[in-house]
Image (cartoon, helix red, strand yellow):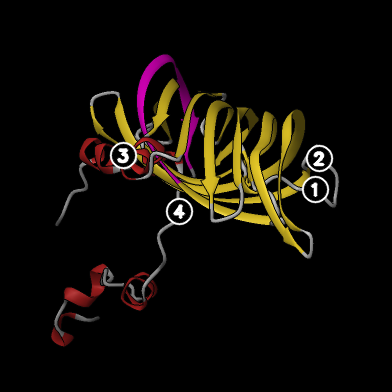
Amino acid sequence: MGYYNLEAGAQNQPPDTIILPLKIRAGAEILGPVIYLTDKNNLNTEGYISVDLNAKTGIFLGAGYSDYKYSQYNYEYMSRGYFVKAGVDFNLLKPETSRGKYWAGIGLRYGLSSFTSEIPSFEHDSYWGTTITTIPSTTSMGHYLEAAPGFRAEIFNNFSMGWSVNIRVLLYTGTGRDLRPINFPGYGAGDESVGFGINYFLSWNIPYRRIKVQINQEEPEETEETEETQGTNTTEPPGSLLSPAEYP
């Protein structure tokens, strides 16, 4: 006859809740400075701060600086300026998987850019000869929308690495439809209505609060063996232990 250990069975049951740390993150984008080491005409720097609101959502605030130069045989172009981005991050991982250390989801952001652009020299050949002119510096302000699916993992205690693929939709360049900037800080090529990019971030994480999160328990599926065992009565009546000769 077997006995079921109630205490051991209770210990083997997964918990209904887990303790999850909420964190403040400060990070820096590293791909832009790496590109600048090989191309001195293109500098992009960006940093961000994010705050976990709960196990699934967090708020995001980012800012950066861009300095872009371009030249070819008949003209030069320069653009520099700042941009800010604000939005919400959604973690698609379950709390028991993320544990406050892993993030895989999507961020939705609104971006605003203020920049100056100029053409220091422009040569134009015509019937009457070569004309050299300039377009002075002008200040513009534009904005765009961004969706950023990505992944982040904590590789050391409170230190994480991650990447995101950025899909951007240009709303307004600030320079009009017929005179778009070659480079739009924070966005990319100003002549593209939809732009793409990729970012790599290093982040420092600061836990500021712990919350208790309810997790869903999956009910175990009944197997055929279990059903057959439950449907078969293995206990014999007391009279079945008597021999036929002992029946009255």
- Separation (CA) of disc 2 from disc 4: 56 Å
Q: Residue furthest top?
A: 208
* Among numbered discs 2 and 4, the one appearing first in the sequence: 2
Q: Which mark is residue 37?
A: 3
Type of residue at label 1?
Leu
List the residue tagged with mark 4: 218
Q: Which mark is residue 104?
A: none
Q: Is residue 108 above or below residue 158?
A: below
Specify the quadrant of the image occupied by residue 33: top left
Q: Secondary structure at mark 1?
A: loop
Given contact means CB atoms under 8 Å apart, are the residues at marks 4 and 3 in contact?
no
* Among numbered discs 1 and 3, the one appearing first in the sequence: 3
Q: Is residue 115 left or right of residue 24?
A: right
Q: Position of residue 94 (x, y in %)?
A: 46, 45
List the residue tagged with mark 2: 175
Q: Position of residue 172 (x, y in %)?
A: 80, 42
Type of residue at label 3?
Leu
The quarter of the picture where the C terminus appears is bottom left
Q: Is residue 230 above or below residue 145?
A: below
- Badge 2, how many Cα within 10 Å: few under 14, some, many 20+? some
Given contact means CB atoms under 8 Å apart, are the residues at marks 2 and 3 in contact?
no
Q: Position of residue 245 (x, y in %)?
A: 14, 86
Q: Is residue 4 left or right of residue 150?
A: left
Q: Which residues are magenta?
A: 199-215
Residue pictured at 34% horizontal, 76% vertical: 232
Q: Which mark is residue 179?
A: 1
Given contact means CB atoms under 8 Å apart, are the residues at marks 1 and 2 in contact?
yes
Q: Secondary structure at mark 2?
A: loop
- Separation (CA) of disc 1 from disc 3: 30 Å
Type of residue at label 2?
Thr
Type of residue at label 4?
Glu
Q: Position of residue 95 (x, y in %)?
A: 44, 39
